[in-house]
Image (tube, helix red, strand yellow):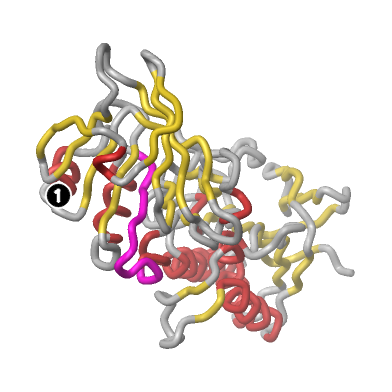
Amino acid sequence: MDRLYDVIIIGSGPAGLTAGIYTSRAELKTLVLAGRIWGGQLMLTSEVENFPGFPEGILGPELMMKIREQSLKYGAEILDVNFKLANYEKDPIEIVTDDEKKFQAKSVIIATGAETKWLGVPGEKEKIGRGVSSCAPCDAAFYRNKNVIVVGGGDTALEEAIVLTKFASHVWVVHRRGELRASEIMQKRAFDNEKISFIFNTEIVEVLGQMKVEGVKLSSKLKAQSSKLQLKIQNLDTEKSVEEIGGKRLTTNHQELVWEMPVDGVFVAIGHTPNSKVFEGIDKDEKGFIKVYDHTKTNKEGVYVAGDVRDGRYQQGITAAGFGCMAALDVERWLRDQQ
């Protein structure tokens, strides 16, 4: 194998594979380092209904396989290995994989995505895609006339809750603190929505159910001399017993109430962690997202970035694919200018 490439793409979600389609169609010698677990977050999504071109919806893994096949069709090479390190000071750039193979690249596109921060509680991991989700725009329609919980207290959590109200019968926002950290405008929108209620000073400690989500076990901090939950319902601060909101009390002491609540879905919205730690020397913001200069450029010459590893805001399959297209076009122009 000739190990010098016009572009090496690191990552194989919608951003990386879309970039591979564009660079290979531009007749750039392209290598995609897909990772040993390839495909990104869409591989964990059961039904995708918001990706253009599939009016009946499509399974996440099926969509990713189609994009991979399209990238291969135009000549991209794909290796299911992990990126280990790069020497950006060499010309061409030297890339090393986790099996110690070395490749050379005239340019690089980083498209390693971001991972959902999950709760890490019993019953959660095995129900991802079966009632546990991190994307209301992707999955809200599956919860028509059902009760769901959103976990989190920031703008993302309230945006998820508002999206869910278009389908769900009721949305409970569970937050571990006594007040939200979302922006004032987002708080007002959520508080004014009669289908959203808030449970404060509360954490989920277990996701219940066999093959799907059937409920949650929660732990709530109690006020002194009180055995009731601290809530906000229809923009009113109030206290209610577990039983008044359809829950079941398990244990109570002076500081903690443990209880169960039947729900059909749990949406986790406590943030994302960009897969960027391995890229030493590449500028990142305080959250670890790769900084972008002039559309898709990083601080290193010939190194570009696409998808959720640079995007802490949108984090959708279609926006990641768009960023992949942008990065590929920028690489093509940059390589042409180097000639």
**Direction from residue 223 to residue 24 in the image, left or right:** right
Point out residue 106 in the picture as x, y percentages from the top left corner: 68, 60
Q: Total of numbered circles in the picture?
A: 1
Q: Residue at x 25, y 13 (%)?
A: 225
**Direction from residue 322 to residue 96 in the image, left or right:** right
Q: Which residue is drawn at 33% across and 57% down?
A: 147
Would residue 144 be counted in the magenta stretch? Answer: yes
Q: Nearer the viewer, residue 292 or 316?
A: 316
Point out residue 310 in the picture as x, y percentages from the top left corner: 47, 50
Q: Residue at x 54, y 62 (%)?
A: 130
Q: Which of 203 and 52 is in front in this view?
A: 203
The residue beneath circle 1 is 189
Q: Is residue 92 visible in this depiction of the protein? A: yes
Part of the protein shown in magenta: 141-152
Where the N terminus falls, by quadrant?
A: bottom right
**Direction from residue 283 to residue 144 in the image, left or right:** left
Q: Which residue is drawn at 59% across and 64% down?
A: 13
Point out residue 304 in the picture as x, y percentages from the top left corner: 54, 55
Where the C terminus falls, by quadrant?
A: bottom right
Query: Relative to residue 52, is residue 165 depicted above or below?
Result: above
Would residue 324 be counted in the magenta stretch? Answer: no
Point out residue 41 in the picture as x, y percentages from the top left corner: 56, 60
Find numbered disc 1 in the image and state the secondary structure of the residue it sits on. helix
Q: Which of 79 and 102 is in front in this view?
A: 79
**Direction from residue 255 to residue 58 in the image, left or right:** right
Q: Nearer the viewer, residue 313 or 210?
A: 210
Residue type pointed to by label 1: Arg
Q: Is residue 302 visible in this depiction of the protein? A: no
Query: Badge 1: how crowded within 10 Å, few (<14), some, or many (20+)?
Result: few
